[in-house]
Image (cartoon, rainbow, N blue to C red):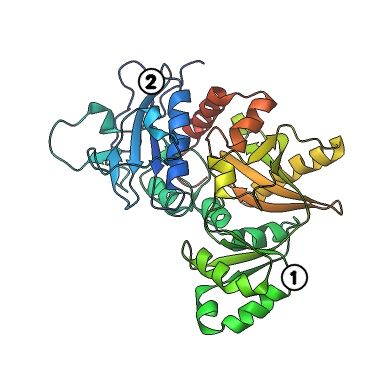
Amino acid sequence: MSKLPVPAAGPGQQPSADGQGRPRVAVVFGGRSSEHAVSCVSAGCVLRAIDRHAWDVVPVGITREGRWALAADDPERLQISGGQLPEVPDTGAAVVLAPDPTSGGLVVQEQGDVPAVLRSVDVVLPLLHGPFGEDGTLQGLLELADVRYVGSGVFASAAAMDKGHMKALLAAAGLATGAYVVISPRAWEHDPAAERAKVRALGLPVFVKPCRAGSSVGITKVTSWDALDAAVEEARRHDPRVIVEAGIVGRELECGVLEGEDGGPAEASVVAEVRVDSEHDFYDFVAKYVDGGATLDVPADLPADVSDEVRRLAVQAFEALGCEGLARVDFFLADDGRVLVNEVNTMPGFTPASAFPQVWAATGLDYPALVARLLRTAAARPVGLR
């Protein structure tokens, strides 16, 4: 891959090339959400894939408590081993990203020998999943600091993170979704009977989920109304705002979308199908990441017209939310032939089990080339309003 030009420095900044013409990327991972471990695994895979001849890499971990620290550039520490999930240790020099475009990027809080690589960064790759990272919060900080970053901006990140708001925006754009009910914390605490009645109108089964979480964390499949309250409380452990979705009989499909290069239109990958084995009731966290209980068929065995429709709708959903960089769009192909958008994920997983890198590899863009394209697109993006 050819070397990328160093993006222009912001006001008061020095160009951050390392002396060998390489721009600098900060890979940020971990975070405060329940998807901390998945973020770590994604980061380990990406650290292996980044072309070190083209980029100078600074790994930055965020602990479960929210402390930012320099992390070891060691992908082996960031993998699931023996069923043990990785996490960011509370060690390493603490750093902050100052929301000041004149500060020059990352700032080390401890005194001592400060690595020169921290003077500035050209691009941040925020491999954070869930709240406090994927939901527009980190994106807002980066915007304030005039730092370029991979992925969607503040609004699209926040809208896609909240499944209720996301479905409302998709419906406003004419995209079909399944039936759902959002339970706000105020409604559940003050009139739970009314919320139960709304949910019962969906019929059984239903899936009770945290509104602002991913990786199937906190999800319960409810097949008896006696189990509804417990399912809501389980979801509320992860997010006080809960969404309940009607069960849909059909197939689960996934499609990747990338922002077009050089101002071109967004592009969709081939379509994949998720098949869950009989030991799992649905596509839960364990099936996704731990015991291999799900199979991803890439490409999905679909009629050409259905595949084309899914790809078209994936791009339409990407544009409807104002996404940038990348997204994975999940669908249901109902038994009655309807194609329903389930959700848009603005920072999909990059683990070996994740669909996003697999669908792009099948489309002709292997893992290193995919990472390179994401960094290249982000480096070319202007800062500020766009």
Residue at the location (44% across, 36% down)?
Answer: 82
Crowd tier of the residue under label 2, counting other residues whose Cα lies within 10 Å: few below 14, some 14–19, many 20 or above: many
Q: Quadrant of residue 110?
A: top left
Indicate whether 251 appears above or below 260.
Answer: below
**As drawn, is 168 to the left or to the right of 349?**
right
Q: Secondary structure at mark 2?
A: loop
Work out whether residue 142 can be spotted. yes
Residue at the location (64% across, 78% down)?
Answer: 196
Residue at the location (32% across, 43% down)?
Answer: 101
Label drawn at residue 22: 2
- Amino acid carrying mark 1 in the image: Gly
Residue 386: give x, y in percent of width and height: 52, 45
Label drawn at residue 203: 1
Work out whether residue 383 can be spotted. no
- Amino acid carrying mark 2 in the image: Arg
Residue 132: give x, y in percent of width and height: 42, 53
Q: Quadrant of residue 15?
A: top left
Indicate whether 19 appears above or below 183.
Answer: above
Q: Quadrant of residue 187?
A: bottom right
